[in-house]
Image (spheres, rainbow, N blue to C red):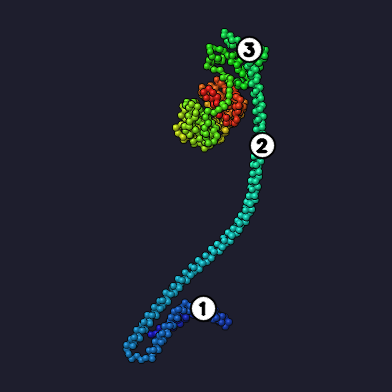
Amino acid sequence: MAADGVASSRRTRTDSAGESERSCGFVVPGGDGGSGDTWRRHIVRQLKNRDRNQSDSFQDLIHFYSRLLDKSSLTNGILSRRPCTDSSSVSSLLNQNDQLKNTTGELAFQVLELQQQIKIKLLVLDEQDSSLLAERRRLAGAFDVRQELQGRAVQVQEENGALKMEYDVLLERQRGAETRLREEKVREGHLLEDMIHLKRQAAARMNSRNERRSRAREANLQKELQSAARSKVAIDSSSSAPTSRSTSPKNEHQDKSAERRHTRLFRSASATSPRILTSIRQLFDRKRRGHSVCSLEEDQMSPVGICLSARVPARALQVLEAHEQGINTVRFSSSSDLLATGGTDRVIKLWDVRAGSLTHRATLDGSTEGITCVDFDSAGSRILAASSDKSALLWRLDDSVPKLTLTGHSRKVTAARFSPSLHQVVTGSADRTIRLWDLHRAACVQVVDVASYCSDLVCSENFIISGHYDCKIRVWDTRAVSCVQELPAQGKVTSLDLSSDHRQLLSCCRDDCLQLVDLRRWSNDRTCFRAEGFKCGSDSTKAVIRNVLCRTV
């Protein structure tokens, strides 16, 4: 049976070879010898290619089949050498033959499976080759990017080197500038010391001249008072106005000169001024009614006050370390014995004034910079403050935290006052504006632009009076939001204050005098207060009216 299988397989291969020869064969027209050799060689070459391709496809099968042929040949040899006498041995051989056939089939099946696995692995290998190709391409791209980044890194290093050189140059320049700045500061210190020394010398010379002039004025005043004491004064009760006559021609000359001095813009009634005779003459030139002296105006118009003496306090009743830094403002309450002080240390302190001594009551804080002005309301329950942080703050006396903060000025607020209407306040600022605020809405309702730095202001019914660094006092009508009058001053106006009856205005200027203006007249006539030793030493000097006395801080 094995021989039959081999023969059949040989016939199969022969038939397939013949079919291949028939399929590959073709007829060439023409039967000459040259063309016949050509197509024979071509056919032989095609047959060799076909045989090689088929043998490559069935190489494994051929090997297994050859092994089977060898085993079958060995079996046939064994059978031919041993006689088939025993039936049991024949049957065993047949069984072995069947087993060999089964084994051959299994091996052929395994061959097919292995071929399938080979095909699958070839496909996987192709995929891996394509993936490897893609990775190689990515690697090449990454290498190009790496080269580009390396080039950029080199460029950045070069730029950093250039910047480092520039930084070193700037550092050297900065060090040189700092050295020059230190030298300039040293020179500035020397110049400042020299300037202070020169100013001290100039101040000493000026004080010496002022002292000589003051002594001369006092001597002249004594002479005038003595001559006035020797003169006779006749008062006629039936006449409408008393007159003062001097029997001396010298006194008549003095009266004429006094009348000429009266035509000046301001009246000075200082005790150290030679104008005292003019003031006394004006006093006796008024109408005498009963035991009172009043002007020719209505009875309610009281005369302008005359300063017969003025002095600078020589001794303090009490000295307290009230603030950690300088005190900028002081304010008395009109309805209680409270005193408020505000300083550069950003707090307001309240003091009880009793028996000439101060007792600390409370401290109000909340401002971020120094306090420049404080004011009490008419009821004495609230306090308003102006601050250098461009705002105004409102406190209740029983609460140290601000109830309202009014913001809107572009520079520090120099003045803040309650208006007669308790729900409104007025502020003045270094930004050359005056603002009217509504406390109910905590908003600005009016803005007035002024021509100069506003140092202080006060409020009356329908009017705001402001003092400025351009040596003018301005009166504003809040109803028309316009300036209705300008009163000239002899220097920068540093502070303003109203009497309790709102009839008189006290102004402090840098000409070292206090001036009292009668608001019922709105004239340029005013009483000037001077005292030896009194100096308006800074732009923040304040003067207040307290119990019919003028006090400065």
Q: Earlier in the sequence, mark 2 or mark 3?
A: 2
Q: Nearer the viewer, residue 494 or 231?
A: 231
Query: Which dot, 1 or 2, sits closer to the camera?
Result: 2
CA distance for labels 3 and 1:
165 Å
| Residue 17: percent from left, percent from top | 47, 81
Residue identified by numbered label 1? 49
Q: Answer above or below: position of 348 versus 82.
A: above
For this rendering, which residue is in front, 102 or 477? Answer: 477
**Residue, x 66% and y 32% (percent of image)?**
201
Q: Secondary structure at mark 3?
A: loop
Q: Identify which residue is drawn at 53% across, 31% down.
A: 319
Q: Which residue is mark 3?
A: 231
Residue type at the position of mark 3: Ser
Looking at the image, tell me whether mark 1 or mark 2 is earlier in sequence order.
Answer: 1
Which of the 4 quarters of the picture holds residue 195? Answer: top right
* Quadrant where the image shows the N terminus: bottom left
Q: Label 1 neighbourhood size at 10 Å, few (<14), some (14-19), many (20+)?
A: few
Quadrant for the C terminus in the image: top right
> What amino acid is labelled 1 in the image?
Asn
Q: Could you tell me which residue is drawn at 46 percent across and 35 percent down? A: 401
Q: Which mark is residue 194?
A: 2
